[in-house]
Amino acid sequence: MDDAAALHAIFSDPRPMRYWSTLAHESLAQTEEWLAGMMATDPASSDDFILEADGEVVGKLGCWRLPEVGYLLNPAAWGRGFASEAMAAFIAHRRRSGSRELTADTDPRNGASIRLLQRHGFVETGRARNSWLIGGQWFDSIYWRVDL
Ligand SMILES: CC(C)(COP(=O)(O)OP(=O)(O)OC[C@H]1O[C@@H](n2cnc3c(N)ncnc32)[C@H](O)[C@@H]1OP(=O)(O)O)[C@@H](O)C(=O)NCCC(=O)NCCS
């Protein structure tokens, strides 16, 4: 729970939350609830990580619900290869855990996320219009999968 404040700085920032599955968090309590939920999940169905660089929390990457991977980095840490490094480590970790696949769901406009998935071998498996209704706005999806 010591990471809640640093995570809240990310989850309350509209830039990284632009294509997230919820609106930006409005209170620290909301992020604490998210973090408590993350820690309470059954490891058989969930495998999620907080990312640190030089001892500072920079984001999260992993599966809130296996096998779907999700990630979010502090904008101050974007473009430095951290997400790619974390994804490579996570894929190796899931392979060692005997997992056969990972999936992902991105907004078609989310270039950084799409590039990250393609770089790590994810292939497109489908598309959907109006798959998410968030804050009164509809968002579309591209679905992805990688075999491990
Ligand atoms: C997606 C995200 C985690 C990428 O983090 P990052 O640390 O900047 O990514 P990296 O530096 O590891 O770069 C990964 C790849 O994306 C590319 N990339 C980075 N920003 C980009 C952008 N704005 N547009 C297109 N490609 C981009 C990089 O060049 C790199 O490609 P390469 O491997 O071919 O060089 C980060 O942008 C983020 O937190 N976004 C908001 C949250 C989000 O949308 N999550 C996904 C929900 S599905």
Image (cartoon, helix red, strand yellow):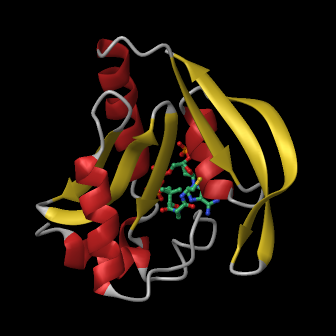
The N terminus - image quarter? bottom left
Q: Residue at x 30, y 53 (%)?
A: 38
Seen from the viewer's position, the closer of residues 35 and 118 is 35
Q: Is residue 50 visible?
A: no
> How many marks on residues?
0
Q: Position of residue 126 (x, y in %)?
A: 82, 34
* Residue 104 shown left or right of residue 79 in the figure: right
Q: Is residue 37 visible?
A: yes
Seen from the viewer's position, the closer of residues 109 and 130 is 130
Q: Residue at x 60, y 39 (%)?
A: 104
Q: Position of residue 130 (x, y in %)?
A: 85, 59
Q: Is residue 104 above or below residue 112?
A: above
Tell me the quadrant of ligand 1. bottom right
Q: Is residue 66 above or below residue 98?
A: below
**Furthest residue toward bottom:** 26
* Residue 11 shown left or right of residue 9 in the figure: right
Seen from the viewer's position, the closer of residues 26 and 53 is 26
Q: Residue at x 60, y 56 (%)?
A: 112
**Furthest residue toward right:** 129
When asked about the image quadrant of residue 62, the answer is top left
Q: Residue at x 32, y 32 (%)?
A: 89
When asked about the image quadrant of residue 28, the answer is bottom left
Q: Is residue 60 above or below residue 78?
A: above
Q: Position of residue 14 (x, y in %)?
A: 54, 82
